[in-house]
Amino acid sequence: MTEPNEPVVALPETVLRVGAGQAAAEPGDIAGNAATAARLVATAAADRVRLLVLPELFLPGYHPPTLAADPSRCEVAADDAGVVTDPRLDGLATAASTHRVAVLVGAAVRAADGARYLAALLVGPDGSIRDAYHKRHLCGVEETDLFVAGTAATTLTVDGWRLGVGVCYDGCFPEHARAAARAGAHAMLYPTAYVVGGEHRRDLYYPARALDNTMFVVFSNGVGGRDPWLFNGGSAVYDPEGRALVRAPDTGETVLVADLDPVLLAATRGAQTMLSDAAVEEPAERRLLTVDRG
């Protein structure tokens, strides 16, 4: 069972097998991209994956001109409870329920209040679809012109694992992952859309978030795209010291599979105590020292 925002629990007791799916999405084709997602679910299920993460805006495709020109074709609607019902997603919902795999996938969501969010949907292993998280740090005018920034944090629970959620640029802010870790998260999940030329930052931020907080990080990036939105892959799963357990090439479709091991998590947090040692608040006073050249 997968539920958002459950109370804090102890360290998990069992291994959680996760997948990071990397694939190209066609701009504006939610049905076609959902069919690709369903195929990736089947691939992941063959390796006994319990949770699959797919890239940012994977369902509509990350292509701002298309997102701006035809909003209704590129978005799904959520009701007051955050439930999404859209026939274009039926195949994905069926795949998730058939294989008993939870899926976190990027989407453009029109909320019940009319606001449009750059979101992550949670497709449960029962086939339900919920608007799980709204990206809090929008990146550039391409996103701020199209979406409203989210204001709430989300934690998912899967098989006793508490999983924080961020979308792409959220991972560039250490305090975002730190807040999830302080709330009890054992791992962070990041659907992303890094473009060609951003390889250095792509390969630095997410292992840093893992090491900062002694947590696993599951990072799913897109490939393909339309110039200048050409995506550079490199999806990965990082261990709690920021080492890549698995990593995808910069091109091509794949599903990475890795085990989140509670023994490794406990051992790392026992040996590397940055999370428990970190000051919770800034000091009340700050000294300013001036060095004269003399």
Image (tube, grey):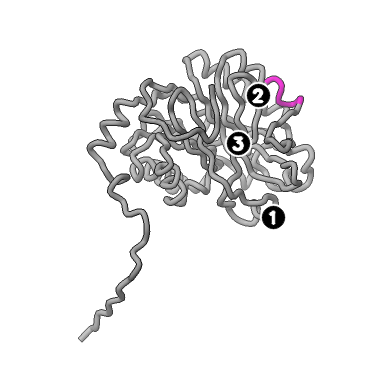
For label 1, the residue is 145
The residue closer to the viewer here, 166 or 158, is 158
Q: Residue at x 61, y 45 (%)?
A: 229
Asked if residue 204 can be seen in this view, the reply is yes
Based on the picture, tell me whether residue 90 belongs to the magenta stretch. yes
Q: Which residue is denoted by mark 3 in the rendering?
A: 132
Say which of marks 1 and 3 sits in front: 3
Amino acid identity at mark 3: Ala
In the picture, measured across the screen, residue 117 lies left or right of residue 210, that is right
Task: State which region is magenta.
Answer: 87-91
- Contact? badges 1 and 3 (CB < 8 Å): no
Q: Which residue is mark 2?
A: 128
Q: Is residue 250 in view from this perspective?
A: no
Horizontal side of 261 relative to 24 (left or right) equals: left
Circle 2 packing at 10 Å, graded few (<14), some (14-19), many (20+), is: some
User: Which of the 4 image quadrants contains residue 104?
Assistant: top right
Q: Say few, some or many: other residues with alpha carbon within 10 Å of mark 1 (under 14 / 14 to 19 / 20 or more).
A: few
Camera-near label (2 vs 1) is 2
Q: 33 or 136, which lies in front?
A: 136
Give residue 108's mark.
Answer: none
Q: Quadrant of residue 86?
A: top right
Q: CA distance from mark 2 to mark 3?
A: 12 Å
Q: CA distance from mark 2 to mark 1?
A: 30 Å
Please, what is the three-letter code of the amino acid marked with disc 2? Ser
Marks 2 and 1, the one that precedes in the sequence: 2
Percent x, y for residue 289? 27, 77
